[in-house]
Amino acid sequence: MNKYIYAILAVILFVTMPAYGFHVEMTNKTIPVSIGDIQSIDIRISSERSDFFVFSLSGMRSWITIPASIPVLPGESSTAKIYFSPYNSTPPIKYNMKLGIESVKTGEKIYRNMTVDVKSTNVMVEKVNTRYQPKINETNLLQVFVKNYESNDVDVDVQISIIDSDGNIVNEFKEPLELSEKEIKLFEKEFVLPDCSPAGKYTIKTVVSDKNNVLSESEYEFQLNSQFLTDMKRVEKRGLLGTEVFLTVKNIGNKQGIAEVNDRVWGSLFFSGESPDNTSGDTFIWKKSLDVCETKIIKYSIDYSLLVFIIIIILLLVYLFYRMRTVTIKKFIISRDYIKKGEKITIGLDVKTHMKVNDVEIKDFVPSVFKVVDAKGMKPTKKKIKFGTELVWKLHQLQRGEERIVHYKIEPLFSVTGTVKLPKAILLFKYLGKSLKKRSNLIDIGADVIDEYYENRHIKKIKHHIGKLKKHIKRKK
């Protein structure tokens, strides 16, 4: 039952609706016009039959001109113009009007609303846009197209404000602009959204004005997305024994996140400070959780004082080493010979000083199998003791870099096959008020006898084999 009721109501509504035999189009619903200037709009009427159309305007002003009537042929269209030319005395306000178009033949009437915006000067913001999708801390280009509808040149000011979703102005600038007659000009300005700008809808408000009045206003909106963005600064302070490094990381975005801070560390052996979360070769990596606009500082130092300490220890050891070897003594054989009864062997003692020393004495011991024979040069004091003879030379004071060589001769009391070791010589001296002692090296005598013995045996073997070979050759013949 309800379906039939709805169908009947629809038919009644369709029959009672006005059926217009013509159609109306307007080029603009808002007409900007300045005082003393002329603007116009086109009214296009198309009709299915031949007809005449008359115009009426509510709130008619004497500075508005409308056509009396226009003819339209069937299936075609005609265009009528309405002219607006405000006087110098016309108040610069907006005039809301209703335009009526009526068919002479049928009496049908169509109404259109329109607004006449009377300005002291007619300059309009035509278009506003940004070159890129705006992001925090990135330079963007704002483009504003401004048109002068006047028949003369004008000077205006363009003020642009970028407003966040909370109504706060984050960027603002104002520039003068010169426009020629009927000129459209591109006004460009770079802008950067400040650190930590909140995500949301932003408005770019553009106001064009002359000295006394606002001529045109426009708003353009864009969306700022959430993003985690960091800024890192590195400060290095060099000192005498090391370097201090400060790594400052800040979340300049509008979203919480984890920042990864990398820094190349030279001399990681001497590193001290906040331990890294990870390393890759000589690159240290720290991870920091940051809230919006939060700043954290990583501090570390490369302390070379340990290296200096090691160098000091090395230098001290070198110093002590040279100090311990203030004086050196070396024992050697001046003339080597076989250990045969009656053959003389010359023994030398070489003393070198690296520092000035006092009360220097050289002591050597000659075993009882040898007899001490006086040699030329500085003669020692001889003293018979158990198992041999003790020799003593008193050199008293030796200067730094001074070298002394003493020598003596010994004579074997019997021949010896092989080698004999002679004991170490002793050097006694005073350095920096302390009595010190150094010993020489051991020396061997008679080694050549063994070498000659084995060499002679080898030659005899060779001669023996050669003789046997000759006998074998003779038998063959």
Image: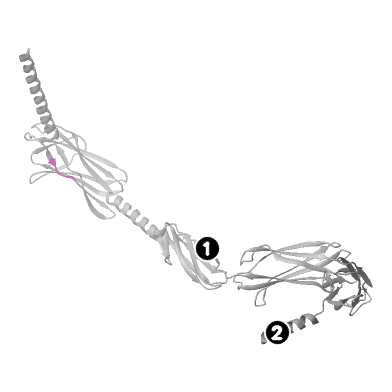
In this orientation, does residue 105 appear? yes
Q: Is residue 364 above or below residue 255?
A: above
Q: Nearer the viewer, residue 264 or 200?
A: 200
| Residue at (23, 52) in percent of width and height | 436
Quote the CA–CA distance across marks 2 and 1: 81 Å
- Point out the tag, 2 or 1, that comes first from the N-terminus: 2
Q: Which mark is residue 6?
A: 2
Q: Amino acid at mark 2?
A: Tyr
Q: Point out the stretch of residues depicted in magenta.
A: 421-425
In this orientation, does residue 93 appear? no
Q: Which residue is mark 1?
A: 235
Local secondary structure at mark 1: strand
Q: Nearer the viewer, residue 25 or 359?
A: 25
> Looking at the rendering, in which quadrant would you find the N terminus?
bottom right
Looking at the image, residue 263 sits to the left or right of residue 443; the answer is right
Majority secondary structure in the magenta region: loop
Q: Label 1: how many residues lie within 10 Å, few (<14), some (14-19) or many (20+)?
A: few
Across and down, in percent, residue 376 comes to 19, 34
Mark 2 vs mark 1, foreground winner is: 2
